[in-house]
Structures are given as C-alpha cells and as structure tokens.
Image (cartoon, helix red, strand yellow):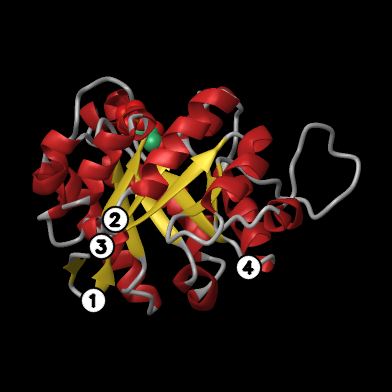
Amino acid sequence: MTQTANRARLVLGNWKMHGSLADNAALLDALRAADAASHCQIGVCVPFPYLAQTAQALAGSAITWGAQDVSAQAKGAFTGEVSASMLKEFGCRWALAGHSERRTLHGESDQLVADKARAALEQGLTPVVCVGESLEQRESGDTLAVIERQLAPVLALGREAVAAMVLAYEPVWAIGTGRTATPEQAQEVHAAIRAALTKLGAPQVQVLYGGSVKAANAATLFAMADIDGALVGGASLVAEEFLRIAAN
Ligand code: 13P
C-alpha cells in the first residue's frame, strides 16, 4: 500500500514455535478474510509442520508464506534439516536465515547464514536475512561493527544475489522484550545497511525492522527513510494486531 522511496512496504510474521492446527486455521482464515487493499504485502513464516496447512489455507490469496529456517545443504544425510527445494514444494516464498534465536541458541555463524541465503536463492526463494546486535554489543558501542561483520559474507555473495534478498534488522535486546528500538535508533542502523547495499549496487533491497513491533509503534518506525516494513514476532499471532501493523 504505502511505499518508502520506491520500495514497497512488506510486513512478515514470524510465528516462531507457536501454533496448533486449530489456532493456525483461525489465524490464517482471519488474515485471508481481510480486504487485501487494506494492508501492504504481508506474509507468514510458520513452523515446518504447518507449511502444508498454510499453503492450503492461503492458496490463491494475496498473502505469501515461508519458513523460519532453511538448510544450507541441497540434500543428503543431514538429519533434522529441511532443504530449500522442500520448502519450494510447499509454495514458500520466504525463508528466514540467521534469526538471532538461530544464531544464539543454535550457534549459527555468519558464514552459515550466508550459505543458507544462497541455498534459498538457488531454489527461487527469497531469503530474509536477519542481523542484529546484543544489548552488551550496543552498550559497548559496537552495533554498526557487529552488523557489518554479520553482513559481510552475505554481501560477498554479490550484487545479483543480494538484490534478490530481503534483510531484517532485529536488535536482540528488542526481541520479545517489549522494548522497541526508537525509530531513530533503528533508522541509524538501517541507514548503515542501506549505505552498504548502495555501495554494492543493490539500493532497492527491502530492509525490515523487527523487535517488539506492534500496531501502536509501527507507524513511527515506518516513517523512517530506510525502514521498509517489519518482521513481527508476538504480534503476528493475533490477526487483528498483525493486520493493523500492515495497514500503515
Ligand atoms: P517480537 O515481535 O515478538 O519482539 O519478535 C521479533 C522477532 O524476532 C521477529 O523475527
């Protein structure tokens, strides 16, 4: 609906490890029932077992869907992993890569995150590459250096690859804490990311903000020049709240 520069606004929900067949059915039906003209482009990133349900519930709608992770490997003996080609079979548009919960709880390295993004791209999925600093890193003044380090192997994939991605800035200290970055704090990092993208020749890449986004704070975040939308956790589990965020 609304645009920042020439970049379309995008609001993605990350359900994390929430949901049940019954709860999902209600949530997906409510999203589908909303007038597509009343919100920007939206999508949901759901747990793997619910991809089939999501694909069925949203088929033919304007709403896109995807996964919260993807293997860097194409196939083989990788117990517990899910490949990009499998996600493709379920109609996924998105694959999150490098969410901070994967980086911290599962030890994912910056290089692995870039490898996952590349694996997603090879199957025509759009990777949503997440970056963000911890509270300790912010307080010691390292925010921009951390973001630069996390992005380095991703940017090394080259202009063409990066141009086909979405990036998400999610300060770890703002995730699930109710403590949103101020629009100015977020914009500072988004501007640095935009500068890196521009240097690479991919200035049109959408850069989403994530971390305690809700209907009450979305508009001020979206008013910032380099914030192109949101990656929403908790508030994406409530259809009305999620749609209100996307109505901005
Ligand atoms: P919350 O919106 O619950 O803070 O989660 C943000 C997030 O991690 C989205 O990926």
Q: Nearer the viewer, residue 37 or 50?
A: 37
Q: Is residue 106 left or right of residue 171?
A: right
Q: Which residue is mark 2?
A: 35
CA gap, disc 1 to disc 2? 23 Å
Q: Which residue is mark 1?
A: 6
Measuring from the top left, give residue 10's x and y in whole percent.
Answer: 32, 57
Residue 229 badge: none
**Comparing labels 2 and 4, the label whose residue is closer to the camera:** 2
Give yes or no for contact between labels 3 and 2 (Cβ–Cβ under 8 Å): yes
Q: Which residue is mark 4?
A: 124
Image height of 227 relative to 237, above or below: below
Q: Dot 1: few (<14), some (14–19), or many (≥20) neighbours within 10 Å?
A: few
Q: Nearer the viewer, residue 38 or 222?
A: 38
Image height of 35 relative to 69, above or below: below
Would residue 178 be visible to someone looking at this image? yes
Ligand 1 neighbours mark 2 (CB distance < 8 Å):
no
Tell me the kind of residue under disc 2.
Answer: Asp
Residue 37 badge: 3
Tell me the kind of residue under disc 3.
Answer: Ala
CA gap, disc 3 to disc 1? 19 Å
Give yes or no for contact between labels 1 and 2 (Cβ–Cβ under 8 Å): no
Residue at 68%, 33% (x, y): give it.
49
Quarter of the rendering containing residue 177: top left
Measuring from the top left, give residue 199's x and y in whole percent.
Answer: 33, 74
Please tell me which of labels 3 and 1 falls first in the chain: 1
